[in-house]
Amino acid sequence: MSVVLLVSTGAAWESRALTTLNEHPATVLLKRCVDVPDLMAAARTGQADVAVVAADLPGLDHGVVDDLRQHGVRVVGVASDLDLARPRAARIGVVTVLAADRVGELAGLVAGLPADPTHPVPAYDTAPDTASDTASDTASRPSGGLAGRVLAVWGAGGAPGRTTLASGLAGELARRGLTTLLVDADPHGGAVAQHLGVLDEVSGLLSAARLVGAGTLDERFVTVQRRLSDYLRVLTGLPRPDRWAELRPGTLTAIVECARQDGQVVLDTGFSLEPDAGEPTARPERNGLTREAVEVADEVVLVGSADPVGLARLARALTELHEHVPDPRVRVVVNRMRPTLGWREADVVTMLAGFGPHLDVHFLPDDQAAVDRALVAGRLLVESGECALTRGIARLLDAMAGPPARLA
């Protein structure tokens, strides 16, 4: 027996839906809700199994669909125009959509829904299986060159230079005439806006997350980005570290997949991949945003500082990355390399060789003067004049035109 909630919007198909739900022996209509808040209140009683809604219901977004699933309520959308409804339904997580002219089959569809609330019903018109689509898209991504590539700049705690490197890579990509989006995805409080002198009280990341929830990211994504040049845009990060809880799992992936359609994407990430303690849930985890970033990336740029403490952290980070990301593609960047440390680049490569015989290791010089000039001016490194660090980043980007290494 399936217990159903129906959200009434006055659509022409509703009277037929009521009739078929009331007459079918395997369905019970619990309540006709007047709007989304009424639907959520009814769902929280724990009595309903299915919510039947108009696919274009105002207020229906990814967060609402996710909350309904948390209460064991599957969502079935009904649409007058399937071609228009399918893309939005897929973006907000509604996997089953029925054409309005087939609403007489609604009760049978509801009664036959599988136990898994995310599984569509092949016998009916359904929204695309977004998980399959994403996997297919990932498989078709280019492994060489830089077209549409997503780079996640990650590194352990201790300020190894993640933001400096991420903004440096994005600036160099833009200088080469490649449309690039730099995303501040640090859940502990990013600093991309401060690095680049962007004064913006509205978080681009949170604004984009709201568009994902509303299913309007494709249409409005450009409105939440800050344009720094003809080729470079920025999605600013969290205004306060405690706002991380507003980013639901899968949100960053949706943002990245949308952004990569227009060009390159560089993600400035947090420092930790460690999961929260306790039972796994579908709710956000603070470090889940960083794990999502390294999972969605075509290549992880793992940065560590060249001193003994930084190299030890870098070695642990290599192990941690392997534990959390299956078969990761990674380039190791040793930052702030300087002769006063007393070792050569070959010595560092030898120290890291145990983590992969073919590990790509690149070196960036300690060029604090260039970093300071850019920071004080609120400009990109490439805008502050050529220096040893910009040349090192350019060489790193040249090397990325080839296929990245995989951790053994």
Image (spheres, rainbow, N blue to C red):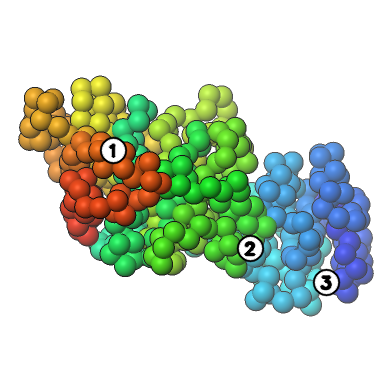
Residue type of the residue flagged with mark 3 = Gly
- Percent x, y for residue 188? 50, 33
Q: Classify the position of the C terminus by image quarter.
A: top left
Q: Residue at x 25, y 53 (%)?
A: 385
- Percent x, y for residue 270? 43, 36
Seen from the viewer's position, the closer of residues 103 and 211 is 211
Could you say which disc has been placed on residue 216 in the image? Answer: 2
Judging by the rendered image, the residue that carries numbered circle 1 is 303
For numbered disc 2, what is the local secondary structure?
A: loop
Horizontal side of residue 259 vs 37, given as left or right: left
Q: Residue at x 20, y 48 (%)?
A: 387
Seen from the viewer's position, the closer of residues 137 and 106 is 137
In the rendered image, the vertical position of residue 273 relative to residue 120, given as above or below: above
Residue type of the residue flagged with mark 1 = Val
* Chain-order first, disc 1 or disc 3: 3
Could you say which disc has been placed on residue 104 in the image? Answer: 3
Horizontal side of residue 105 vs 177, given as left or right: right
Furthest residue toward top:
309
The reply to whether dot 2 and dot 1 touch (C-beta < 8 Å) is no
Badge 1 crowding class, 10 Å Cα cut-off, few under 14, some 14 to 19, many 20 or more, is many
